[in-house]
Amino acid sequence: MIYRHIYRFFLSQYLIHQFVTLSFCFTCILLLSTSVLHAQEPTQRYEGRYRLLDSVTGTAIYDYTMVADDTVKNGNFRFQQFIEHYQDSDTIHGFVLDGPFSGNIKNGPWRFVSRDFTVSGNPQALDARVVYDVNGQESLIKTTFKSGIVNGQYELIDRNLVDSYAADTTYYAQFSYEMGQPQGALRGSAPNLRIEGQFDQEGFPHGDWRFTHIQDSIADIIEIRRYDHGFFSKHYYELERQRYEISHIGFDTLVRSGQGLLTRLPVTSTYFRALEYTELLMDTTALSGVFTDGNLQILLSRSNQFMERVLANPASYRGKNVWQRVAGSTLIPPIRIKIRKFPFSDEEKRLNLANEKLLRETRLIINQFLDNPAVQTGRFSQEELARSFAAFGIYESRLAALAPPLAFLVDEAAEYVDHHAILNRKKLALSYPDSISYEHRDTTKIALYNFPPALENYEVAAINRHLTAIFNDVQRVVQQSGKFVQQVLAQGELTSKEQQLIDLRDSVMHAFSEQETAQPFTPLHRRFSEAVHLQLDSTFRSYSLLSVQDRLIAIDSLLSCYQAYGGLHATLGQLQQRLDQIDEEYTRSIWNAYTYTYMEERVKERLYNTYHDELIPYLLTTLQQNLDCNTLSTSLSRIYSLLDRMMDLRMEDTRELERQLRRAPKDPEQYFEIISNKRVTEG
Amino acid sequence: MTFNTRAITLLLTSWFLFSFPANAQDERPDEAIKQPLSTAAWNGFYGKFRISDKIFWDAQFHYRRVGNESADYLGQMGQIYNRHAINYLVNERFSVSLGPVLRLNFSPDPGNPEFDNLVLEPRIWHEYLFAMPLSRSMIYHRIRIEHRWSRSNAVGADWIFRNRWRYKFYMNIPLNNNKLAPGTVFFTPDIEIIMQNGKKVVDSPLEDLRINPSIGYILNPRVKLTVGMMYTTGQTLDAGYLYTNRWIFRTNAYFSLDFRKKESRVPRTRLFD
């Protein structure tokens, strides 16, 4: 018993001793750490305007410490710039860049988000805030930096938002970096496209890159691009587990790495342009009936577009490297590939550039000549000008055909494809007739013309000789034509007015051409297009055949006539809107409680039908058949007075008027009279 | 062809009822028995009158005749049916209704003193209608629940209470148009199942199965008309193995009117429209 008490006493003494010792140690550690903290500068927070390295200003919040009178970012950083256009268009656009710093170096997960939103719906009160939903696009780039070097998962996302919710992802790519170098797998998607690929240890694309093109109606088409440590060595498409090879004419896929023949090229748009230049050869029998070569080419272009974004510009958004807008990280280089180069010799480069310049300058002279108002009017009376005009038209068509191959030869991408093989696939045949035909004083004439010999191959020296010959001929013609042009130019005031006249004529013709105009083109424009073209053409032709004296008298009225035609275009555009508006005004939408649908009903049916089925066709046909500068404005004002009257009648009691329409003889002029007569409804 | 259907039905029903009064379960036949074919003609007038943005007065009237030995379909009065409700349009795809029904049941054998000439049958009903638009057509799911107090026309018959559980699927498919608009002829496939329960419902939960295809015409946004032949079958209340067997000629007129003040109608309309 006594031993037990002795044992308990010593045990309690031991525990007390242990507790005192631990307490002492803990207190020491606490004091020590506190003193260390006090020795450092305190962390401060900045909140306010901030200017990025590319001079874009916005607001930022970040933590920093002061070291040697300079700020050193430590902790989270967030920059944002949003511009609101509520007043004008309810839009907001801007971007956010945020992530952590450690000693002014990016360290940890970083994110760039760009947003283009349009406010949608009604405001909602949320506590003390007013919240709007938005529609729009959002683009994200996310990654992790380690000591300023990209290291970890890298994601690129573009998506659309509808009512503030992500509706669909239009671009997604995910892969990884290990200390600045891409590694491992890449996964991605775009609408109707899924991508899986792999990088080797040096960061080159390697192995089979699979592009699954999802088709709605047929089996998915799988496109396979095989990379041999960065070298694009095989290209297939796969349909229902059967592979078909795609050969790129002019793109070397046979050279194997390790032979010292390959260039290591950072992937840029040049590489993909080179791919697009190559002609594709493939067995398309499997695709017959479901798919054409053209469609497959579109699919391959989509794959190229996907790859270009992720391989060439992983850190880029709208042309700017997002991570370089704030210092603290090394540049993320584009991913590299290996490629066989087909370099031009220095002489070839010189001639290619010279040819391209010669072509450009010759076409410039030709087009200035063709567009010259003195030439355009003078060619109907001066035979020499008419002949030159016809010859230059032939030159222009040939040079237009030569322009794309010359643009290809001066493109840097041409050195990454076998340019000879590519050009030789397309036969060049620039040949010229022995004679030209032209119109002079309303008769067609034919004359011999000494064009240069035909050009039948892409040999750069031959192209140069050919272009030089054309250039010399064009210069000679321009110099010789000078005296004829001068005769026309000498007409002084008339010339400047004719310039206006031609510009006006061309702009009206342009506006009435569905293929050419950028302005709205309604069915009414289509209806009047041919008649307006005929009118402008015939009036201009008649004018051109007049003597100078008569032209001086006629030009002012022709100018105002063309202005009236210009007004007709705008008027027809508004007229279609007015017709639609009246259609809408005379339509009532009624809820049917049995079908659970809205049904439309015409109101004032007899009045509307008379206006729509009888009067408008009658007035438009009259306008079209008598298209003439003198009657144009009168005819249009009749149409507009009818439309105004119809808008007024919508609000009035029209029972008496409709009764009169019912009894009236079937004559549009009578209908017009009844509808226009205000006394009818007032009586 | 003339059926003496009503008389045969009555005879058969009476025979079953009085032959197995005490232990009908024990004496029930091995197979379901179909009643002789009977016919009827139902003429319906349906009105939905909008009285506010969300609320409609739903008024329905049926004039129903049944065939007898003198004439199929139209031989004698069957029922007159008055159904009213307040219909609340939750949104353009869903509505609910609640209201009373008063049905007038005429004697199945006019002049027979064993039957009252007229018996009233009150009900309370509520309905949940879901409308689903397709590109051209509309699909509808209608759930209707009725609480009914009824008695047969037999003199001195007891009142019984039953609930009816009705589900109806129907569509409006335009035939000469790409939408339901005035001037459109449409086809309506229509099928409805009516279940019932109550103390007196022993072995006849399936009261009626109605297959009612019809052809309709939209006269204007406010009026549509339909005509169709409906086949129905279901268990009789007192003998679950005995199935009704009816062809019913149906004509319906549907009126959808707006009783709101003109200026408050949406979309707005003008004074002299």
Image: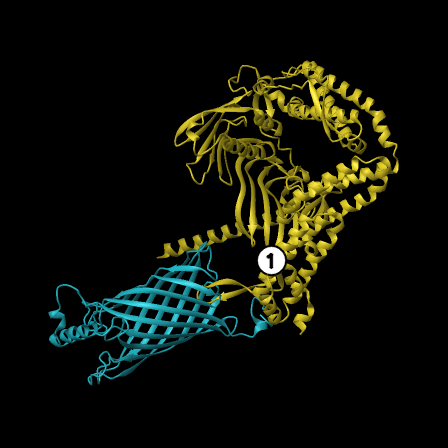
Chain colours: A yellow, B cyan
Residue B242 quadrant: bottom left
Query: Residue A497: x percent and y percent?
Result: 83, 40
Task: Write down the quadrant of residue B7 in the picture.
Answer: bottom left
Quadrant of the snapshot with the N terminus of chain A: bottom left
Q: Which residue is mark 1?
A: A614
Residue at 86%, 32% in the rendered image: A489
Chain identity of mark 1: A
From the viewer's side, name the closer residue of A441 and A72.
A441
Give the residue type that dot 1 points to.
Answer: Glu
Any part of residue A165 in sight: yes
Q: Nearer the viewer, residue A86 or A660?
A: A660
Coordinates of residue A158 in the picture (x, y in percent): 57, 43
Name the one closer to the observer, A415 or A568. Answer: A568
Would you place residue B224 above or below residue A516 in this image? below
Under circle 1, the secondary element is helix
Q: Which percent across, then down, holds residue A303?
A: 53, 33
Q: Is residue A77 visible?
A: no
